[in-house]
Image: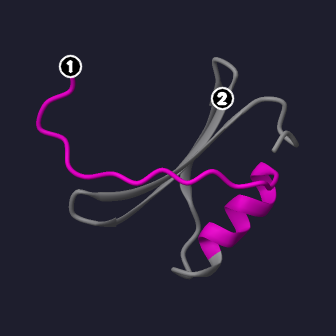
Amino acid sequence: MFRGGGLGLSVLADASFAVAKYAMERDPGKPLRNCESGDGMRTCELSIAEQRTVILALNDPPEEK
């Protein structure tokens, strides 16, 4: 059980990882950081404020939607 977590929001997008990443970088005007691939997942994140992080995650293959 996860304790001490804040509120969260999940969004499903019908887009490739590259398209979703571009859209998420465009609005805040900052690039996503800490991009990693492993265990069948691709992830990137952007810290936007203290205890506020945007995370993009997608199952591989990379162009899957």
Q: Earlier in the sequence, mark 1 or mark 2?
A: 1
Q: Residue at left 59%, top 68%?
A: 31
Residue 34 % position (x, y): 52, 47
Q: In which image quadrant can residue 2 be found?
A: top left
Quadrant (top left, top right, bottom left, bottom right) of the N terminus: top left
Residue 16 % position (x, y): 82, 51
Q: Residue at left 68%, top 71%?
A: 23
Q: Is residue 46 above or below residue 42?
A: below
Residue 12 drawn in magenta:
yes
Nearest to the observer: residue 17 or residue 36: 17
Q: Main structural element of the magenta stretch: helix, strand or loop?
A: loop
Per the rendered image, the range of residues in magenta is 1-25
Q: Which mark is residue 41?
A: 2
Q: Give the colour scheme shown.
A: one colour
- The residue wearing badge 1 is 1
Numbered disc in front, either 1 or 2: 1
Q: Is residue 51 left or right of residue 58?
A: left
Q: Residue at left 25%, top 52%?
A: 7
> Quick one: SS at disc 1?
loop
> Quick one: SS at disc 2?
strand
Determine the CA span between mark 1 and mark 2: 22 Å
Label 1 neighbour load within 10 Å: few <14, some 14-19, many 20+: few
Residue 40 drawn in magenta:
no
Q: Residue at left 65%, top 23%?
A: 38
Q: Is residue 8 left or right of residue 11?
A: left
Residue 51 % position (x, y): 22, 57
Label 2 neighbour load within 10 Å: few <14, some 14-19, many 20+: few
